[in-house]
Amino acid sequence: IRDRKLVTLSEYRAVDYLPDEISVPVPAALIEPAPEVADPLALVSPEELATLIADVERRELPDLDRIAAEHREKESARASARITELESRRGALTSDLDALLASRIDHPFADPKARKVHQRSLRLRDALDKERNALAEVLQREIDAEDLRIRDVIRGIRDVLHRFGYLRQGYPTEKADMLADIFDTDGLILCELIDRGTLDNLAPEELAELFSWFSFDREYRYANHFTLPDRLVAARRRLEDLEHDVLGEERDLKLFISEGHNPSFYGAALHWSRGWTMSQIGDQMELSEGDLVLTFNKTIDLMRQVREMLIGVAPEHPLRHKLVAAEKLLRRGIVEQSLSLGFSPIAEIPEDDREIADDDIDTAADEAATLN
């Protein structure tokens, strides 16, 4: 019934509103009328229709049209506010988009060639990063391996020093003071020679000869026609026994510090100390004058180290003055000139030591004359 008219209800979706617990009796003739009925009003009398309409009006049904209008008004106001907000956001986004488009046009990578160059640079950077990380891992492994090797070397040196009495229960002994002042790879061997008294009975020129064995560091494969006196032969045998102990102990611990003397080089320093010329020595050994001068300079430096060590550790040791005399015997002629003209000349001998050395030289000369 709409506007006091009958409206046929053919399906549920045509119902706009269905209140709870409100019902109106409908004449049976209007319930499921036959399809062929053209006018449903003809099915009921006017009185029944009026009663039905009056019954509906008494129910005080809501005004659906008014409610719908109010709802539409509210939704329209809410939609208008939402539209206004969206329009504002669209304006801001439009401005941002225009700025982005402008920056894209002005960007250095707007040029496709620049983008390709940049992409290649990125790939190169990634490759370099991977290579750097790989190298860092290799380096770390090398550092760890080197650290382990150094630890092994330190332990080996400690064991060698314990073996020869330079350390005792981890603490340095008096012998360690000698070794601390000898800056030569064969310092341990030289200190053992001094400690064992092997050098005590040698004359100054014989000391110069023995120290020269440690100063010649080249391969010598030529004939050597010199012969050594008995005292040097005996000293050489004791030296070889000592080197066998030192080098064997070091090699067992995988140490390669001491090198030992050169077994093929001998006789040159002894005869130079006795006044021979470089030409005469060269005839016996087939060595150049430069090699001989260099070897004698190293011999002087090595003897100086030992002498200065004895000044600090054992100033009363008789070997100290013999070393001064041996050094004076070597420092003559072209050897003295090379020391004077060198960039780092060897320090001069103190005057007090010179006087004592002169007496040792005279004694050595007397001994040589007796042997001759």
Image: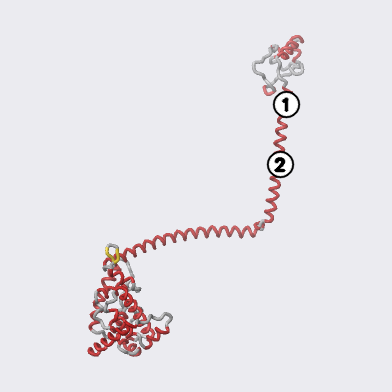
Q: How many marks?
A: 2
State the residue at coordinates (32%, 82%): 352
36 displayed left or right of 311: right
Q: In the rendered image, which quarter contains the N terminus?
A: top right
**Amino acid type of the residue tagged 1 in the rendering:** Glu
Q: Residues within 10 Å of mark 1 (few under 14, many from 20)?
A: few
**Amino acid type of the residue tagged 2 in the rendering:** Ser
Q: Is residue 64 visible?
A: yes
Q: Residues within 10 Å of mark 2 (few under 14, many from 20)?
A: few
Q: Is residue 322 above or below residue 189?
A: below
Q: Which mark is residue 247?
A: none
State the residue at coordinates (72%, 40%): 87
**Residue of label 2:** 88
368 displayed left or right of 103: left
Instruction: Look at the numbered disc 1 and give the secondary structure of its residue.
Output: helix
Nearest the viewer among 109 and 339 is 339
Real-space Cα distance between discs 1 and 2?
Answer: 27 Å
Q: In the rendered image, which quarter contains the C terminus?
A: bottom left
State the residue at coordinates (77%, 10%): 46
Q: Is residue 223 visible?
A: no
Q: Earlier in the sequence, mark 1 or mark 2?
A: 1
**Residue of label 1:** 70
Q: Residue furthest front?
A: 352
x then y, percent, for residue 300: 34, 81
